[in-house]
Image (spheres, rainbow, N blue to C red):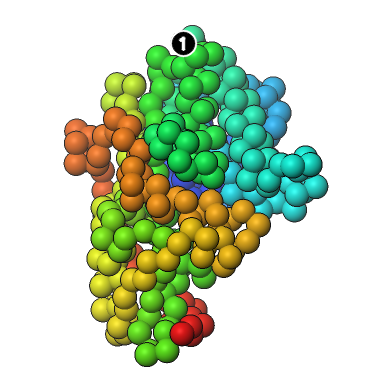
Amino acid sequence: MSKLVVVLGATGNQGGSVVDAFLNEPGWKVRGITRDPTRSSAKALAERGVEVVKGDIGDVNSLIEAFKGATAIFAVTDFWGIFADPDSAKKVKPGQTINEYSYHAELKQAQGIIDAASTTANSTLERFVWSSLSNAEVASKGKYSWMYHFNSKAVAVDYIRETHPALWAKTSMIQVGLYATNFVNFPMLWPKKAADGVYELSQPCSGDALMPFIVTRKDTGGFVKALIQLPPGKTVLAYGDMMSHNEYLKIWAKHNGVQARFRQITVDDCDKAAPGGFGREAGESWTYFEEFGYAGGEDVIHPKDLGVPVSTTSMETFVKNADWSEALKGDSHA
């Protein structure tokens, strides 16, 4: 009898990679949950052999139905999707930032997902894989208070442990590293051409601080598959390369035939460049990573210590295959 992996966010970066990892895996069937099965992205999944079912992360009952019969569940939430949703701004309370609102909204969604998943814990479920991140506020003892997109996912882990012990006994976590694609998709992460013609990447951390880079859409699924194969209670830090911005820039500059350097700025600089909460939270993230590490000192397993081979994509391969044409147009600055 086939086993069943149920995937939240099946059309997204993390969930889509999990779908890919299991779709042709002997003995497994894949069920993808989507709010609208009639969308083109959902139909594309169905054409590939995925069982696409309707489920809304705001509707626990719909998730309970979607999780029925699951051998494994992969669950992920999306802070930045909430943050960027125009409807979210209308729901922000007086004195509340959009970041704070998004934190509470994401946590509420997470709790609903967890409550729904718990209904399978004493029947078919063997593994619940939660996409989490470190608790920056706890790790930094309150020094970094704007890491809402990290803290919400970490507090959800506490909720599993404290509220659903049967589910917790079957849970493992994945902390997905820095999305390599962000360096292509977000102008804030493009090296900008300075007055002397050299491209500068500016962040509020040292250029030598090590960061975990991952090609999320391609590599996340392999790590999730490993966690489903291994005993529960593990947290893996998923990445392809642990490298500094300076090392990344060396690869980027060589591929694009330009000169590049790193320039350290401040969190306030990030806030000014992207006001409204995004710049502040992004800026604090870089300083937190440098001081406390991406995992915040938590007990995580690195890829080489996982005990199960996982194929990953190097940043050199990623840079070589990415389209940098827009980034190379980068606005000049003095």
Residue 144 seen from this side? yes
Q: Residue furthest bottom?
A: 196
Q: Is 89 or 312 nearer to us in this picture? A: 89
The quarter holding residue 323 reads: bottom left
Q: Position of residue 221 (x, y in %)?
A: 38, 43
Q: Work out whether residue 23 or residue 148 is closer to the camera in this orientation and state it.
A: 148
Residue at 36 percent of width and 71 percent of height: 263
- The residue shown at (66%, 53%) is 84
Measured along the vertical axis of the image, is residue 184 above or below residue 147? below
User: Looking at the picture, how far across and down is residue 111, in whole percent?
Assistant: 60, 25
Residue type at tag 1: Ala
Q: Is residue 218 left or right of residue 283?
A: left
Q: Which residue is mark 1?
A: 166
Please tell me whether mark 1 sits on a helix, a strand or a loop.
helix
| Mark 1 nearby-residue class (10 Å; few <14, some 14–19, many ≥20) | some
Q: Is residue 290 above or below residue 30?
A: below
Tell me, yes or no, if residue 32 can be seen here.
no
Q: Is residue 182 left or right of residue 148?
A: left
Q: Position of residue 204 (x, y in %)?
A: 41, 60
Q: Nearer the viewer, residue 322 or 83?
A: 83
How many discs appear?
1
Q: Residue at x 26, y 34 (%)?
A: 301
- Identity of the residue drawn at 62% across and 53% down: 277
Direction from residue 312 to residue 174 in the image, left or right: right
Q: Position of residue 98 (x, y in %)?
A: 68, 47
The N terminus appears in which quarter of the rendering? Answer: top left
Tell me if residue 270 comes above or below residue 286 in the rendering: below
Please tell me in which quadrant of the rendered image residue 200 appears.
bottom left
